[in-house]
Every structure is written in structure tokens, then in C-alpha cells.
Image (cartoon, grey):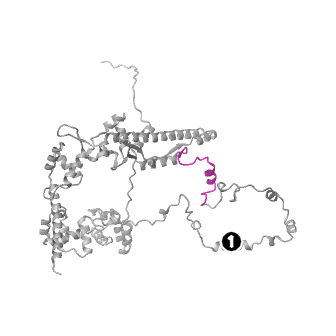
Amino acid sequence: MALTQRLEFRQSQSLVMTPQLMQAIKLLQLSNLDLTTFVEEELERNPLLERANDEAPGGEAPAEAGQFGDGDDSGGQGEGHGDDGFGGSGDAFEPGQEEWMSKDLGTRAEIEQTLDTGLDNVFSEEPAEAAARNAQDAAPTTYTEWGGGASGDEDYNLEAFVAAETTLSDHLAEQLSVAFTGAAQRMIGQYLIDLVDEAGYLPPDLGQAAERLGATQADVEDVLAVLQKFDPAGVCARNLSECLAIQLRELDRYDPAMQALVEHLDLLAKRDIASLRKLCGVDDEDIADMIGEIRRLNPKPGMKFGSARLQTMVPDVYVRPGPDGGWHVELNSDTLPRVLVNQTYYSELSKKIGKDGDKSYFTDALQNATWLVRALDQRARTILKVATEIVRQQDGFFTHGVAHLRPLNLKAVADAIQMHESTVSRVTANKYMATNRGTFELKYFFTASIASADGGEAHSAEAVRHHIKQLIDSEEPSAILSDDTIVERLRASGIDIARRTVAKYREAMRIPSSVQRRRDKQSALGNVLSTALSDRSRNTEPA
């Protein structure tokens, strides 16, 4: 086969991912908080972008007030307060006043001759000096005079005066400075405090602490023993058993029987009361009292100190019942950033800019600003389109509840609105919908399908989970449902499901096994009966 060279022309199509297209795709999957942060950064970076609720930069009042500071807080009177510049009403001088102001009064001797007295008698400095001394000695009477700013200002924030919360690390560091005087011990203690998590626990293995600090393991253990006596009780423990043991020692209740109970918390979790009673060597009444004491302890002592605040979930879409029996879908306008392109500012700049580099910069800024406005509008339209289709597909859920949730995938929604599946996936990420049945993430409405036992319409996996939970919640203590029994009842309801799928769904909902549920309900029933018998015996005692 001979090798030859030749020229060929080929025509093909390909999708070029421009930076703006990549940024538009990224905007789709941002949450409302992340989108607000992104827009704020663009507003700081791009001089041609402005908020839609802001006044135009060329406005008279903001521009003139800005030349003189912050308006009321600055104490000065800008042009926005009066045209005369002296805080008056802005009226012009009267003709007689203008003539007097423009008249030449002459020399000092001529003025004294005209007034028939010396200028020292007319303009005495004593009243001014006295007024200055009185003003200096007087205490500030308003918040503004103290330097805090006017309370009527829009930037006035009452939360700025709230004291910061004391963190667990700060609380332990204060006790550390009192407990130790040696620099080496304080260094070890501070290192261990830095390892404490928000619940108050240390890592189980502290072997590397001695190596990194250049200290012996015995020194670390000695410092740890002191830290475990700090407030709150149970802090600096390495596991739950040690945390509970520290608190019981503080209460002087850590006897051998309680020690055996703390060391076998796994049996307590399984409600294996018979084994615990044998290990502790106590009777039924004593083991019940010991379990009650354990329940009154705090398994996470560090949580009562300041921690990261939870961010309130703000829905992106609202779904309300319509007057015609349907559903009205609308976007939450509070989560949509409003930005505009300042074309007037760009027109003024283009007339004054002479350098090519400056022209290129503002041209790019105009293009980026225009693209951002269009991208935000397109993002809002896409979210509304996807949410509307979800509501149409899941009409039974909004009308009747979770039991009527239909199986739905991304492809079904993408085909209905003529978009790609990846676009729908990005739109539904980190977006929430407020409905008459609560607030749900858009991903919640996409569930797998489970075949019907009679060959009918498939069932949603979320609806099956809800059905399993209802069966378990309604079971009697004397007739606990096993996974096999649940499978039989689901198949009788027309749901074809395997036993391992039932077990997977049950564990995902954190529902214990049938053996554990039987122990829990029998234990709860026994406590109720013992309480009733004790109350009855107390009522039958002779007075």
C-alpha cells in the first residue's frame, strides 16, 4: 500500500464551549445564596452593572449628596439639603442683602468711625469663647454625638451591638489559663483543645499528639485528665462511654454496677435488659433506675455553646392552588437578583475615552454585563419551565399526598420541555419548591419506579417508602411485622417488591429491625404497666 499526501476539505459541526456558555451552565446549578454572591462579585468588578432598585448614577440628589459624605451622619449640609449651602430653605438673597454683602466697608478706621465705637466692643470674643467652653464641657446628648451614627440611617444595624457567642474553644481556653502555669502544659492543653469538635469530643487516637509536640505520652495523658474535669462535664472525651463516665463521676454515681452498664452501651441500644441485669448484678428496679440516670446525661456536652448558625432554606418556586382547580406556579422574586446595564454611563464614557486599551476594557465590560442580564433571565425562565412540568407530572402528589407520587425521571421532563437531561439535572440541583404539603427539593420529585404486581401502573419508590412506614407505625406490640410480612402485604396492595428492597428502604428511614422493634415496644409497654401498678397501689394504701 503506497503512502501519498493529499488535501481534503471536510465540513463538520461541533459545539464550542465558550467561557460565557460555561458560565451560563454554571449559573443554572447555583443556589439562590450562591447566585447572590456571584452577582455581588460581578457588581463590584463591572462598572457598567447596577442594581435595578438603585437610582441612576447621574441622579442629582445621590451624586450631590455623595460629594459631601453620608448626608445626615456627616453633619455637613450638602446641596441636597438646600441650594444656598447654609442649611436654609434655598431661597436667593434679597436685593438689599446682596447689595449689603457686596458693598466695600472700607478700612478698620473707617468702620470704627462709622459705628462710633471700636471693633473690640462690637465683636467681643468672650461670648464665643464661653459658648465653646460650654459646648466642650457638655456631655453628648444623642447617639450621633457619641460617634455611633444616626439611628435613622438605613445602615443602622441593631445586631451590631449584640455580644458574640462564646465558643467551646474559647470557654476551654479560659479554664486552661487558670488550670496550668507551665508553658509546656499549656501548649499541650491548647493543642488538645484545638482537636475538640463541636460536640466536645477528641479523636480516639492521640498517639500523634505526643510526637508532634515533642512530649511523652504520659504528659499528654496527664494534661488530658485535667481537661476532662473542665466545664461542661463530659468534655474532651474520646468516645461516648468515656463521656458518660466523666459525667457520672461528677455526680458521684460511677459505682461498679454503673461502670458495667456504661461499658456495655451496645446492649442498652439493643434493649437487651436481661443481659445488662446479669452483667451489673442488680434487679429489675435498679437497672431501670440506672438506665434513667444514663438518659438524663448529655451525650454531646459541647453543643450548648455557640456553633455555626443554620441557614434558613428559602424556596425558589411557589406552588399555590389555582381558582380553576389547577396549580399556579411562580418564581420567588426575592431570590432573583435584579441587575441592569447602565447604557447612559457607557455612552458618556465612550465620548471621553481616547486610549484603545480603555475602550477595549469598557467594551468587554458592556458585553459581560449584557450577557449576565440575559443569562439571569434565561435561568429564571428555565427554572419556571422545569418546575411547571414537575407540577404537571406530579399533580396527584399535590392533590392527595405522598401515596400518589408517580415515578419520574429526568428524561421524561427533558422530553416534555424539549431540553437536555443535563440541563434539567442542573436546574433541579439546590432548588426548593414551597407547596401546600411543605417545602421540598426539586430532586425529591424524581423517584425510581417499582413494578406493579398485577401488571398495572408502576409505583414510585417514595410512595412505597411511605407505605412501609405506615405499616410499621400501625403495627401492634404483640404482632410486630417482619420484612417478609411487609413484602406480603405490599404485594397484596399491588406492589411487586423484594425483601432486600424492603430492608434497604427501612434502614434508609432509620427504622430498626423487627427484633429490635419488639424489644422497644415491649419495654415501653412494661414501663407503662409498672407505672400504672405503682399508681394503683399508691391509691389503695390506707390513709
Q: Nearer the viewer, residue 370 or 216?
A: 370
Q: Answer with left or right where residue 10 lies relative to residue 88.
A: left
Would you say the magenta stretch is mainly helix, strand or loop?
loop
x then y, percent, for residue 494: 18, 42
Q: Answer with left or right where residue 483 lies relative to residue 221.
A: left
x then y, percent, for residue 422: 35, 38
- Write the start and end of the magenta stretch as one range: 46-72
Q: Nearer the viewer, residue 218 or 263?
A: 263
Q: Secondary structure at mark 1?
A: helix
Provide the residue designation for mark 1: 132
Residue 529 position by quadrant: bottom left
- The answer to whether residue 213 of the structure is visible from this angle is no
Q: Residue at x 39, y 55 (%)?
A: 312
What amino acid type should be assigned to the residue bearing mark 1? Ala
Q: Answer with left or right where residue 113 lies relative to residue 257.
A: right
Q: Nearer the viewer, residue 145 or 210?
A: 145
x then y, percent, for residue 83: 69, 54
Residue at the front extreme, as displayed: 324
Q: Nearer the viewer, residue 180 or 4?
A: 180
Residue at the bottom extreme, as displayed: 543
Q: Is residue 333 magenta?
A: no
Q: Residue at x 62, y 41 (%)?
A: 348
Q: Is residue 67 magenta?
A: yes
Q: Residue at x 19, y 51 (%)?
A: 471
Quarter of the figure with the N terminus? top left
